[in-house]
Every structure is written in C-alpha cells, then in structure tokens.
Image: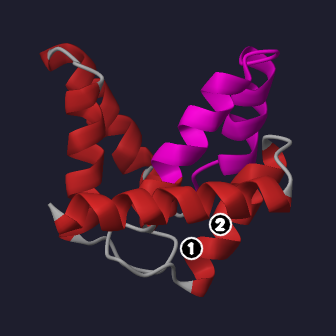
Amino acid sequence: MGYVAKSDGRLTRDEIAVAERVMDQMRLNATQRKVAIKLFEQGKADDFPAQAILAQFRRESFRRSSLVQMLLEIVAATALADGVLHAQERATLEEVAAALGVSASRLDALLTRVSGQAGFEDAD
C-alpha cells in the first residue's frame, strides 16, 4: 500500500486513512498492526523491491485468485483515496497488475468498480 500511496510523489491523509481502515477491517491485533505499519513504511522507500515482492506474492497466491483480487482492490482504493487517480498512480497500478498476471482490461474493470464504491460510500 505504501508503494502505491507514494507513487504520485506524496502521501496524503486520505491514503493513510485507507490503510488504517484496511487494518481495522482485517481485525489486526496490536502486534500485527505494528508489522503492517512497518510494511507500509517500507513500501514508501525509494529502494522498495516491488517487483520481487509482487513475484513472491504471485507465487504464494497460486490458484487463489481471490487473494490477487483483494490485493488489487486494496491498492486501487489507496490510489483513489484522494478522489483522483493520478497518472503515476495509474502507471503503478498497471505495473502491480502486470506483475500479478492481471490484464489491463481486468484492472480497468476493477478501477471502475472501486471508484464507484468510493463514490457510493462518500454519498452516505
């Protein structure tokens, strides 16, 4: 998440709020939350090995497409947190999707759905 959040050059409060919401939804305990925060911070680093991490995730989620889908939904929500999908965020999402074996058309459909859900939630 940190990798995508920082891809447009800056980290926003909205992106942090999405990360916190995901941690809440996952019902992480205090120790797990500290680990998640550390991983988020590592993802923001300029030397973060995104391709290696994504390759490992792809190997470990073999035949469990729901995990890939969930990861893409989370990083898409992060990119859309401020209500705008910046060009660099889009490029980063395309990079993540490609590394996970997800087609551009499937990513487009996911982005449409996630942005629609965000708009629906904001209307409440």
Residue at the image point whose x is 72% and y is 57% from the top: 107
Q: Amino acid at mark 1?
A: Glu
Instruction: Please tell me in which quadrant of the rendered image residue 40 appears.
Output: top left
Q: Residues within 10 Å of mark 1 (few under 14, many from 20)?
A: many
Q: Residues within 10 Å of mark 2 (few under 14, many from 20)?
A: many
Q: Is residue 57 magenta?
A: yes
- Residue 37 % position (x, y): 27, 38
Residue at the image point whose x is 40% and y is 37% from the top: 39
Seen from the viewer's position, the closer of residues 12 and 74 is: 74
Q: Amino acid at mark 2?
A: Thr
| Segment tinted magenta in the rendering | 47-75
Task: Tell me: residue 96, above or below residue 71.
Answer: below
Is disc 2 in contact with disc 1, using a CB cutoff of under 8 Å? Answer: yes
How many badges with numbers are in the image?
2
Q: Is residue 54 magenta?
A: yes
Q: Which residue is mark 1?
A: 89
Seen from the viewer's position, the closer of residues 64 and 32 is: 64
Q: In the rendered view, does 54 fall on the left or right side of 29? A: right
- Element class at badge 1: helix
Q: CA distance from mark 2 to mark 1?
A: 5 Å
Residue 85 can be seen, yes or no: yes
- Element class at badge 2: helix
The majority secondary structure of the magenta stretch comes to helix
- Residue 114 % position (x, y): 49, 57
Seen from the viewer's position, the closer of residues 52 and 26 is: 26
- Residue 95 % position (x, y): 75, 60
Residue at the image point whose x is 28% and y is 52% from the top: 18
Q: Which residue is mark 2?
A: 92
